[in-house]
Image: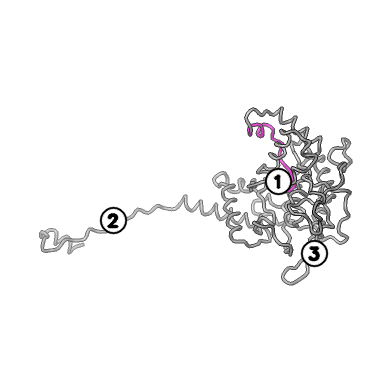
Amino acid sequence: MARGHGRILTSIWEDADFLALGEREQRLYLFLISQPNLNHAGLLDLTLRRWSRKARGLTSAELEKLLQALEETRFVVMDEDTEELLIRSFIRNDGVWRMPKVMGAAVSGALEISSKHLQRALLDEMDRIPLDELSNDPTKYRGEDGPSIRAQVAAHIQALHKAFGTLTPDPSGRGSATPSVPPSATPSDTPSEGATEGGPKASTRGRAGASRAHSPAPAPSPTPAPEGEGGGLGNEPRPSDVEAEAPMPDGLAPIDEDGFALTDAMRRWALDTFGSGLDVDYETAQFLDHHRAEGRRRNNWPAEWQKWMRRSAKWASERRTRTHLRPVAPPTAPRDMNHMTKEEIQRALNF
């Protein structure tokens, strides 16, 4: 499902690196953050021609220059061979790393990356996640202790390292160097507990210092969800069944907290299974609205989405094949026999 909004921290206007950009580079960065197909890992398809049509007078050549400026300042990482773009610090800036289930969706989105260059840059960003700022207390699920939030997030990071394997050092050095500026405060909308007024402000790009050690006892890697009917969803990591005790952000329903998103694999499954007769985007929007209003959690959102699409396709087929019944007019009430002819009385009696 395409996103309905992009999250921009107000501290972006206090970030020295962002303020050092030109107006056009700043606008392009905000444009990238607000793209509907940006996934939880910060990955975008590099579509210069399509983007150039979003502003009068903008050309692909001009966009390429602006993107190169953003890459040189390490706001983005690109690979022209695979036509992919990564918003480098998206996971940390968007708060994805604070919510284990959304982090699981980020890992799922990261597995779509083809470029080794982008994979390497994302792993470097994952290793900068400040795990020691996450709760290490066991979570509660049906009265029993479960893995802590820190352990769950560490497990997702470990799973991504395992999925990407051993990557050779980048000879270009791009996307792997530690930022030269001092580490900033935790990227969030509100200061962290214990922060003093006038202290360091959160950086828009979410920089952190050296890599922090992972939890000494991470939870097991997430178990992939079983393949759905028609295939294509087997690589989606199944959301953890453990419910975190941390409060949900305002305005988020469980489906949002769990990080449900319509992926390319899910879209391909729907098109291969039902053809073009089913409006995937419309039905997904209906699915999201329903579960946001219901406010209940599901163990496997992609499987729940598949069920919704199958029901929608079945109902659409039934509507198309349903026989349309024509209303039958009721018989005309007979007139008073005192004012009827002999023939009319005979017909009425034989009716």
Q: Is residue 29 visible?
A: yes
For marks 1 and 3 on the same chain, the one whose residue lies earlier in the sequence: 1
Q: Which residues are magenta?
A: 40-54
Considering only order in the chain, which callout, 2 or 3, is on the residue closer to the N terminus? 3
Query: SS class of the residue under badge 3?
Result: loop
Which class describes the residues within 10 Å of circle 3: few (<14), some (14-19), or many (20+)? many
Q: Which residue is mark 3?
A: 147
Q: Residue at x 69, y 54 (%)?
A: 259
Q: Is residue 260 above or below residue 349?
A: above
Q: Residue at x 83, y 43 (%)?
A: 120
- On whether residue 180 falls in the magenta region, the answer is no
Residue at left 80%, top 64%? Answer: 147
Instruction: Write down the quadrant of residue 88 in the picture.
Output: top right
Q: Three-letter amino acid code at disc 3?
A: Pro
**Can you tell which of label 1 and label 2 is closer to the viewer?**
1
Which residue was labeled with disc 2? Answer: 329
* Front label number (1 vs 3): 1
| Relative to 38, residue 318 above or below | below
Which is more toward the observer, 255 or 22?
Answer: 22
The verdict on residue 52 being magenta is yes
Residue 320 coordinates in the image, percent (x, y): 47, 50
- Residue highlighted by disc 1: 8
**Distance in Å between CA atoms under marks 1 and 3:** 31 Å
Q: Amino acid at mark 2?
A: Ala
The image quadrant that residue 247 belongs to is bottom right
